[in-house]
């Protein structure tokens, strides 16, 4: 009797399970998701679609409906995944083509959208009428820095000894003009010209009296980055950053450390220098993650330097709404090496975005953002914490930002030889800019 009850119970459980599976049939999923699609009721459609796919019920029109639903819910990366699956089944579906094209565009994968444009239906291409203007965007940016401890540094130095010399900035301003050019469907060029003026102080201790001498400098930078779409959301970047500058010579016929080794003075009233950064990166934009590896070489301030790193951005919601990111960079500046860590969070909507970030590590002649950002002042930045807010309009993007840095530099002897003794100071940076899109 007990065995019979056990068999009956097992049969009942199997029957119940089969009945539950049968309740989620292909016919029901098809008819229900179609009805929800016609009503534009996107959230229930996506909930049922996820349940159906988890149960092994998946078909072409479910992919299409879910892809469009994700698009309408502004989850472009989820939309790309489903629409790419649908496109792999039927490359001639014009609806899929259109939504996939705009999903690429709205998720920021502009080069991917250009590549896909050539595969689209002729009439659809004519309705979109994609053009490649000579200039697709123009940007104006300014960076203003201020040494927070400048007044205190001028007046006192409890660690200074007779004969000590230290160099520190007061402020500098960097003005930049950038242009973006779509060279072809696969290739985009961004380049930027920047000019910078600096004011710094050479402070000497003579008989316990601090003598402050101000010196001016100017710098011109040219940066160029070429991005190539390799297909399937792979991208290759190559970049170059060239720097030319000069500053007042306060130490005639004496080797000065501000410019690094090998930069010695003469009877000239100014010291000239030129540096270069060259490198590249390889990126893969997956549905929920973007991975980038980079490498660069430079001779900033006369130091031969090698840098390599890895950066990652996550899209846990299948959209760009919340994007945590992080990375690490290895830097070798013979004979020293260091590792720099970066992390942050980006919150993005149709109207604005907020990015908070932090960087920790010895940043001396350090490069970031594919070589676009240079930490090439004499002092070593120990950390930087900041935020950037951007506001989006139909034809422009306006941004403002603020960051706070702690810096460290060495004392020098009367002969301007570097010592092991160091001092620290803090610096704040304010950025502002506007980009017009054409």
Image (tube, grey):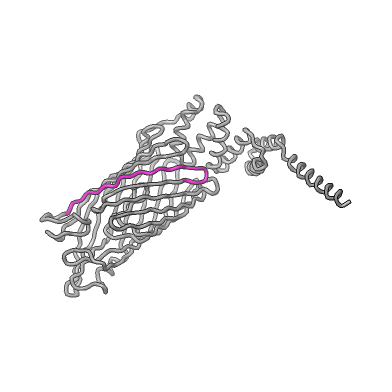
Left or right: 3 in relation to 247: right
> Which residues, given as a range, are shown in magenta?
271-290
Counting from the top left corner in percent of width and height, residue 199 is at 24, 58
Query: To which quarter of the image does residue 261 belong?
Result: bottom left
- Decide: is 165 above or below 115: below
Q: What's the magenta bit mostly, secondary-structure-wise?
A: strand
Counting from the top left corner in percent of width and height, residue 108 is at 46, 41
Question: Magenta span has 32?
Answer: no
Counting from the top left corner in percent of width and height, residue 75 is at 55, 43
Q: Which residue is farthest left?
A: 267
Counting from the top left corner in percent of width and height, residue 320 is at 50, 46
- Decide: is 15 above or below 60: below
Residue at left offset 57%, top offset 40%: 72
Left or right: 100 in relation to 264: right
Question: Magenta span has 278?
Answer: yes
User: Along the line of sight, which residue is nearer the eye, 352 or 280?
Assistant: 280
Residue at left offset 44%, top offset 33%: 114
User: Along the line of sight, which residue is nearer the eye, 288 or 332?
Assistant: 332
- Decide: is 227 above or below 274: above
Q: Which residue is farthest top?
A: 122
Residue at left offset 44%, top offset 39%: 234
User: Along the line of sight, which residue is nearer the eye, 420 or 206?
Assistant: 420
Left or right: 265 in relation to 42: left
Query: To which quarter of the image does residue 412 belong?
Result: bottom left
So how many labels did they put on this image? 0
Query: To which quarter of the image does residue 438 belong?
Result: top left
């Amino acid at each position: 009797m007990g065995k019979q009850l056990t068999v009956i119970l097992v049969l009942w459980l199997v029957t119940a399970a089969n009945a539950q599976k049968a309740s989620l049939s292909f016919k029901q999923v098809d008819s229900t998701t179609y009805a929800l699609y016609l009503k534009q009721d996107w959230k229930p459609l996506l909930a049922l679609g996820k349940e159906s796919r988890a149960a092994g019920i998946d078909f072409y029109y479910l992919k299409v409906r879910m892809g469009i639903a994700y698009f309408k819910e502004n989850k472009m990366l989820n939309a790309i995944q489903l629409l790419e699956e649908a496109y792999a089944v039927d490359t001639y579906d014009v609806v899929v083509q259109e939504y996939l094209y705009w999903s690429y565009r709205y998720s920021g994968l502009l080069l991917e959208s250009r590549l896909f444009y050539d595969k689209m239906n002729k009439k659809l291409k004519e309705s979109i009428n994609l053009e490649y203007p000579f200039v697709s965007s123009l940007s104006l940016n300014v960076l203003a820095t201020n040494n927070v401890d400048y007044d205190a540094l001028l007046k006192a130095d409890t660690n200074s000894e007779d004969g000590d010399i230290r160099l520190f900035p007061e402020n500098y301003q960097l003005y930049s003009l950038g242009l973006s050019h779509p060279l072809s469907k696969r290739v985009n060029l961004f380049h930027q010209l920047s000019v910078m003026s600096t004011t710094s102080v050479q402070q000497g201790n003579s008989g316990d009296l601090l003598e402050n001498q101000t010196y001016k400098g100017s710098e011109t930078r040219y940066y160029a980055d070429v991005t190539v779409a390799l297909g399937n959301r792979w991208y290759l970047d190559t970049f170059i950053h060239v720097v030319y500058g000069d500053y007042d010579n306060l130490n005639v016929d004496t080797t000065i450390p501000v410019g690094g080794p090998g930069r010695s003075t003469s009877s000239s009233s100014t010291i000239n220098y030129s540096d270069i950064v060259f490198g590249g990166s390889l990126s893969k934009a997956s549905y929920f993650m973007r991975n980038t590896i980079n490498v660069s070489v430079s001779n900033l301030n006369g130091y031969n330097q090698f840098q390599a790193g890895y950066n990652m951005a996550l899209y846990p919601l299948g959209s760009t709404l919340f994007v945590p990111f992080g990375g690490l960079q290895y830097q070798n500046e013979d004979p020293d090496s260091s590792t720099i860590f970066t992390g942050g969070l980006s919150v993005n909507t149709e109207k604005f975005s907020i990015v908070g970030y932090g960087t920790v590590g010895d940043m001396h002649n350090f490069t970031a953002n594919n070589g676009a950002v240079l930490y090439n002042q004499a002092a070593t930045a120990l950390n930087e914490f900041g935020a950037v807010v951007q506001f989006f309009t139909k034809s422009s993007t306006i941004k403002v930002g603020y960051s706070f840095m702690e810096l460290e530099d060495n004392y020098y002897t009367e002969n301007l030889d570097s010592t092991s003794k160091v001092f620290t100071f803090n610096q704040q940076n304010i950025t502002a800019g506007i980009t017009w899109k054409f």
